[in-house]
Amino acid sequence: LFAHGICDHPSSWSQVQLAIAAYLQTHYPALYQNANLYQVQANGALASDVSLYDSGGTEIIPGFDPLPTNPKYFAIGFIDPVCPYCPPNSHDPINVMNYSIAEKGDEIGAAIAAIKQLTGAPKVIVIAHSMGGLDARSYLENLGVVNSHTSRQDSDVVALTTIDAPHSGSPFASLFQFVPNDIVVPTVPPIELKHCFAETSLNMDELAPGSPTLDNLNY
């Protein structure tokens, strides 16, 4: 399960996932035949609240659409509170920044439960970028509202890899006021860096060094 960071979308994992899929298909072809990246979105705390989308962003509805065969790769799209049932890649990252890290941890927990039901796998590997690493840790440390994670040997996360996660916070968010307006990340839809990172939001407050959220994560 790939978890994106602040001001981002699940589609940003596409190139990383393709590289991982190519390696695994070369070395373990029988296990990793399906190289597609599916998107998941938790609209509640239960596995039944999770929506599944194909790589093109079309929702796969159980009971109506055929379920994917042997899926291995998933990317979570965190909820946009303004449009909670919109496809993940259509979310406005500024709206997403106003759901707390603890709530995002609950979303990861629900997504993992749904992935386990779909695949039959008892555990997942989570790879998280930027604030996604803190979201995943919130789930693992039972800091969310639901607190659904079972720790230690019974954990349903076999490994967590974080990439550039601000575990101690980030004092540099204000520097984005100096970023030129025309710098755009080529995601779908594109993200205007300055516009997103310069916004005041709940998540930006949580990323401030010494915030209560970081104190809870790093107790």
Image (spheres, rainbow, N blue to C red):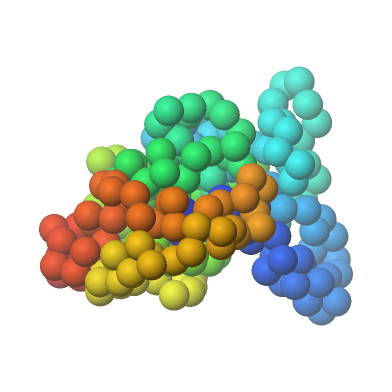
The structure residue drawn at horizontal position 72% and vertical position 21%, both measured from the top left corner, is: 63
For the image shown, how many numbered marks are present on the structure? 0
Q: Dividing the picture into quarters, in which one does residue 72 lie?
A: bottom right
- Please indicate whether residue 191 sits to the left or right of residue 38 in the image: left
Q: Which of the two residues, 63 or 205, is positioned nearer the viewer here?
A: 205
Q: Residue 134: x percent and y percent?
A: 35, 62
Residue 138 position (above or below residue 44)? below
Residue 182 position (above or below residue 104)? below
* Residue 44 showing in the rendered view: no
Q: Residue 73: x percent and y percent?
A: 68, 56
Q: Residue 148: x percent and y percent?
A: 34, 46
The structure residue drawn at horizontal position 38% and vertical position 67%, both measured from the top left corner, is: 178
The structure residue drawn at horizontal position 64% and vertical position 45%, both measured from the top left corner, is: 189
Please identify the quadrant where the C terminus is shown. bottom left
- Please indicate whether residue 93 sits to the left or right of residue 35 in the image: left
- Please indicate whether residue 66 sits to the left or right of residue 59 in the image: right
* Residue 100 showing in the rendered view: yes
Please identify the quadrant where the N terminus is shown. bottom right
Q: Residue 199: x percent and y percent?
A: 34, 49
Residue 28 position (above or below residue 55)? below
Q: Residue furthest top?
A: 64
The structure residue drawn at horizontal position 79% and vertical position 63%, both measured from the top left corner, is: 32
